[in-house]
Image (spheres, rainbow, N blue to C red):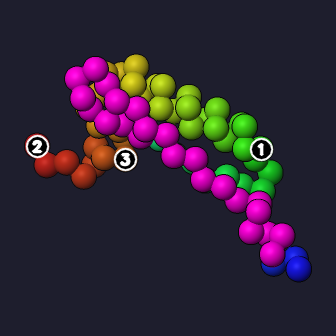
Amino acid sequence: MKNFDLLWLYFFFSLVGETTTGCTLGSSILGQKNLQADEAGKRSATELSEVLKTGACVDQHCQDQLIV
């Protein structure tokens, strides 16, 4: 039964925000054994908020995949 219990120790948050100009930005976090779900949610929300404040059209995960 220990393996079954391990399945519940991990979680994933994915947040998406849209700017007033129509850009869609995202933030995500994979939970860990010693990370509470509410703390993980706060971290993901903070990351998304910081990206939205920059006024960028893409998030940091997309920047290196663009060809200018």
Residues packed near mark 2 inside 10 Å, few (<14), some (14 to 19) or many (20 plus): few
- Distance Cα–Cα, label 3 vs label 2: 16 Å
User: Is label 1 in a helix, a strand or a loop?
Assistant: loop
Q: Residues within 10 Å of mark 1 (few under 14, many from 20)?
A: few
Rendered location of residue 35, percent (x, y): 75, 47
Could you say where residue 45 lies in the image, as x and y percent from the top left?
56, 32
Give coordinates of residue 68: x percent, y percent: 11, 43
Residues rendered magenta in the picture = 4-26
* Disc number for residue 36: 1
Q: Which callout, 1 or 2, points to the residue nearer the camera? A: 1
CB within 8 Å, label 1 to label 2? no
**Does 39 appear above or below 10?**
above
Amino acid carrying mark 1 in the image = Gln
Residue 10 magenta-highlighted: yes
Seen at 31% across and 25% down, the residue is: 19
Look at label 3 and name its amino acid: His
Seen in the picture, residue 36 relative to 30 is either above or below; the reply is above
Q: Earlier in the sequence, mark 3 or mark 1?
A: 1
Task: Give the structural element (helix, strand or loop) at label 2.
Answer: loop
| Residue 43 screen position, x and y as percent | 61, 35
- Residue, disc 3: 61
Q: How many numbered marks, from 0 up?
A: 3
**Secondary structure of residue under mark 3:** helix
Q: Is residue 46 above or below residue 9?
A: above
Looking at the image, which residue is at 57% across and 37% down? 44
Asked if residue 23 lies left or right of residue 30, the reply is: left
Quadrant of res 55: top left
User: Given this view, does label 3 or label 1 mark the residue nearer the observer?
Assistant: 1
Residue 57 got which mark?
Answer: none
Residue identifier under label 2: 68
